[in-house]
Amino acid sequence: MSGTGPRLLRQAGIEVRIVDPKRVRNFARSAGRLAKNDTIDADMIAWFAETFDEAPGQAYDAAREKLAQIVHARQALLDLQTVLRNRSEQAAPEPVQKMHVRLLKKIALELAKLEAAITALIKITPHFAERAEIIESVPGLAGTTAAGLIAAMPELGQVNNKIAAALLGAAPYDDDSGRRRGERHIKGGRRKVRNQFYMACMGAATQHNPVLKAFYRRLIAKGKEPKVALVACMRKLIVILNTMIARRQKWDSSRYALG
């Protein structure tokens, strides 16, 4: 659903919760509802919402919607920048190479403008500024990560830790049957913010955050694959952030040291 749909529903006084559409579809299949049309979809969505009420409804926030649009535009430019840089590394005629150089310079300028707009919007919006200050107090997390979390995960600080990890898509799910114990996998969640958070967590767990670095090294020493260890760090960090925001507290390494 686009940003317009939730806004219109909220204006009509209807509570809105945004969930992964795959969850609703799988819920329908599990109930034996294989047919699909608008009427059936509406019925299944209502049934799903009554059954799973873990995430609170979010009131319409025009500033957050604006921030989300700018954050998404910035990410789209970053993706385009990566594509052009990869193409520039390949053999191409000189006119094409020069075009890539010009486009990359223009993208860099536009990125700077969007990042300035993000910073300004957070600064002039009190509840954004407070949340950003808490998130950025964590060693290894910068303004871009704070903006992404503010825009995509307004539930932080309002839900329990298990739900916070699930919303990010960092919660492990079992794959067991009888005596077989399968590998745990993460599923669902909000892919764009998860990808951004993964990159930030990689830097925090391997370089900038002593607490998370110790946790990461402990997992590696136990034989965990680096990617598995990083996902565990993501889960641990989003839980810590959820607690910090709920308590309106900044980072305290002694408080959040992992025993």
Image (tube, rainbow, N blue to C red):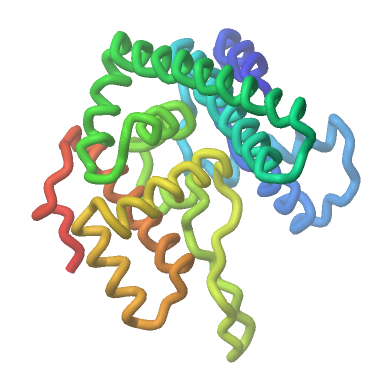
Q: Position of residue 187 (x, y in %)?
A: 59, 57
Q: Quadrant of the C terminus?
A: bottom left
Residue located at (39% from left, 46% from top): 200
Residue located at (46% from left, 13% from top): 113
Viewer-proximal residue, 147 or 13?
147
Q: Quadrant of the N terminus?
A: top right
Viewer-proximal residue, 157 or 192?
192
Q: Quadrant of residue 52?
A: top right
> Is 236 rendered above or below residue 8?
below
Q: Residue furthest bottom?
A: 179
Q: Position of residue 167 (x, y in %)?
A: 49, 45
Viewer-proximal residue, 72 or 203?
203
Residue 49 visible in the snapshot: no
Q: Residue furthest front?
A: 94
Residue located at (73% from left, 53% from top): 26
Q: Position of residue 161 (x, y in %)?
A: 35, 50
